[in-house]
């Protein structure tokens, strides 16, 4: 039996038709002809999510940023309705290798020099411009990515000033209002923390607790050897749901605004 007929049979058994299968917002899940057709239909915004592979204490997986930013970028694209999401950039600046600094002091972390990160980001943007995308949004989930994203956006926007293409470094998304909102809920700043604390832990409690080691969650302070700054044990799934919504909404609003004001 031909593959198409097999797929149709499976869909019929599941009670759906091929027409009911929603179109993915993730670029890597499309064929090239589907991307070509999406561009022709007006999907000319692409989001490049940047994450990182870094230590997040004993209670949270190394791919934290990659999992979270992919989910949030996908939700942003769905809200925009005319955007696709590029593959997550998982190799980002995380410190020096020898001697190790920053997160590179912890096994499992992968680092790249800022200049290398910027080159990859720039060439991704140039690729999308070549294909016909007009708005290229850089969605960075880690603090170490922000300066390089801003630099790449500034360089390319200067070079492309006389074209319809713009690169947007999204500043409303990260760090976003999540930490201050937690304080507004009565949480202490030292519990909210600044790395692998309540913000990201709460997000995973809502999205996917399997990315957490619940028995390893507890209060930590900077330079105590854990890699954690904060008290992830104070996190709740309800906190995570609200924080994710704030970040997603902020990014979608900023992209909508910049698609007009940047030209």
Image (spheres, rainbow, N blue to C red):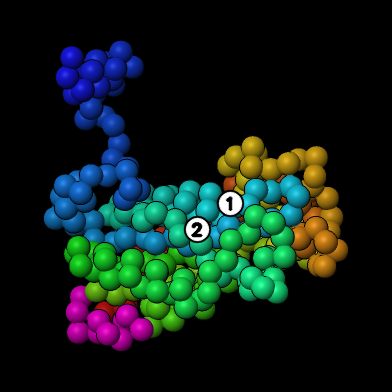
Residue 90 marker: 2
Q: On the picture, is 218 further left or further right than 23?
A: right
Percent from the top left, x then y, of residue 122? 36, 73
Q: Is residue 158 magenta?
A: yes
| Relative to 21, residue 32 above or below | below
Residue 256 marker: none
| Relative to 180, residue 27 above or below | above
User: Which quadrant of the figure has residue 258?
Assistant: bottom left
Percent from the top left, x then y, of residue 245? 53, 52
| Residue depicted at x 28% and y 40% | 23
Determine which residue is flagged by label 1.
63
Dots 2, 1 in contact, CB < 8 A? yes
Residue nearer the viewer, 175 or 159 = 159
* Mark 2 closeness class: few <14, some 14–19, many ≥20 residues within 10 Å: some
The residue range painted magenta reads: 155-164
Q: Is residue 225 magenta?
A: no
User: Which quadrant of the figure has residue 253?
Assistant: bottom left
| Relative to 74, residue 162 above or below | below
Of the 4 image quadrants, the one containing the N terminus is top left
């Amino acid at each position: 039996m031909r593959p198409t007929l097999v797929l149709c049979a499976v869909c019929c058994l599941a009670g759906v038709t091929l027409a009911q299968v929603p179109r993915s917002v993730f670029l890597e899940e499309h064929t090239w002809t589907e991307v070509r057709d999406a561009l022709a239909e007006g999907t000319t915004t692409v989001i490049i999510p940047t994450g990182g592979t870094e230590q997040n204490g004993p209670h949270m997986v190394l791919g934290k940023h990659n999992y979270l930013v992919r989910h949030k970028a996908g939700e942003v694209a769905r809200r925009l309705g005319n955007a696709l999401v590029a593959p997550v950039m998982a190799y980002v600046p995380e410190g020096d290798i020898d001697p190790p600094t920053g997160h590179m002091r912890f096994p499992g972390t992968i680092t790249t020099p800022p200049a290398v990160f910027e080159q990859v980001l720039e060439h991704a943007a140039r690729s999308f411009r070549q294909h016909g995308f007009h708005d290229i949004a850089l969605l960075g989930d880690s603090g170490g990515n922000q300066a390089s994203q801003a630099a790449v956006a500034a360089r390319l926007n200067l070079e492309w000033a006389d074209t319809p293409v713009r690169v947007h470094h999204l500043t409303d998304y990260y760090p976003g209002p999540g930490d201050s909102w937690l304080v507004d809920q009565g949480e202490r700043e030292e519990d909210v923390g600044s790395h692998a604390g309540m913000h990201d832990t709460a997000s995973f409690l809502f999205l996917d607790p399997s990315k957490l080691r619940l028995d390893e969650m507890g209060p930590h302070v900077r330079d105590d050897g854990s890699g954690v700054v904060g008290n992830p044990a104070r996190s709740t799934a309800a906190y995570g749901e609200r924080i994710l919504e704030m970040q997603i909404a902020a990014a979608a609003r900023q992209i909508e605004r910049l698609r007009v004001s940047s030209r």
